[in-house]
Image (cartoon, rainbow, N blue to C red):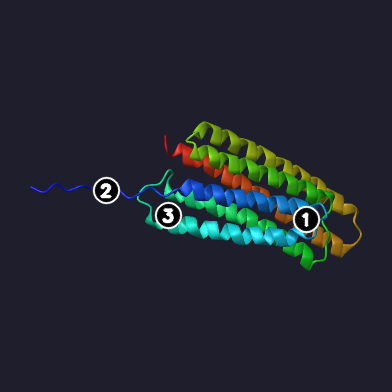
Amino acid sequence: MTQRHWFLPDAPDLLGILQQQSAITVEGMDELVAWAGGDASAADRLRACEHKADKRKRELRETLTTAFSTPLEPEDIYELSRGLDDILNNAKNIVGEAEAMQTAPDGAIAEMSAELADGTKLLAEAFTMFAQDDRTAATALADRAVKDQRHVQHRYRAAMSALIKEQDLREVTARRELYRRLARTADTLAGVAERVWYSVLKER
């Protein structure tokens, strides 16, 4: 009788692709900080990062459709990647809105951008801990990311309050929109961090 040998397909490195996407997202958020600090040329570099991250996102989704097994639930990997994509898209759109409204970044925008960049770095570290199968460290980093984004909300409220003293209606309208976009990006980032926790809880 002929023996049959069964071979399972190789498990794709989905967390590796997610790490690549997160590294590019960190790079893009650093460019947002540079732009907010007055480096106008950083806008084009941010847009280039967004295009690179899109390629990693598409690669991850294509790989997910054929993966026999995954290190996390496929839905969680998908949502973590989608959240990263939203963060970087928001950053790109913030810069685009500012350019369209001919509004230069101010101190509040610079501070909120720096907080967003720090939070993104924590997410990237959390994904690295996932790849190392250290769920405890991943969730601790996610907690820190959520805490960081509360600072964005505090700065947002202070910046909005300061607009009351501004007499130029165009300036008020433009800055209010940019502040709101930054605050919403902080919410998105916190949502990704919460998804890290959710993906761990589902494994228990």
Q: Are marks 1 and 2 in contact (CB under 8 Å)?
A: no
Label 2 crowd bin: few (<14), some (14–19), many (20+), radius 10 Å: few
Point out which mark residue 57 bears.
none
Type of residue at label 3? Leu
**From the viewer's perspective, is residue 169 above or below residue 147?**
below
Residue 193, image x and y in percent?
58, 43
Residue at image position (90%, 53%) is 165
Asked whether the viewer can see residue 8, the reply is yes
Residue 46, image x and y in percent?
69, 58
Type of residue at label 1? Trp
Which is more foreground, mark 1 or mark 2? Answer: 2
Residue behind mark 3: 64
Compute the Cα span from label 2 to label 3. 19 Å
Q: Is residue 165 left or right of residue 125?
A: right
Residue behind mark 1: 35
- Dividing the picture into quarters, in which one does residue 94 lie? bottom right
Residue 56, image x and y in percent?
53, 56
Of mark 1 and mark 2, the one earlier in the sequence is: 2
Which is more foreground, mark 2 or mark 3? Answer: 2
Compute the Cα span from label 1 to label 2. 51 Å
Q: Is residue 77 left or right of residue 125?
A: left
Residue behind mark 2: 7
Q: How many marks?
A: 3
Of mark 2 and mark 3, the one earlier in the sequence is: 2
Where's the C terminus, which quadrant? top left
Label 1 crowd bin: few (<14), some (14–19), many (20+), radius 10 Å: many
Residue at image position (62%, 52%) is 24
Q: Residue furthest top?
A: 136
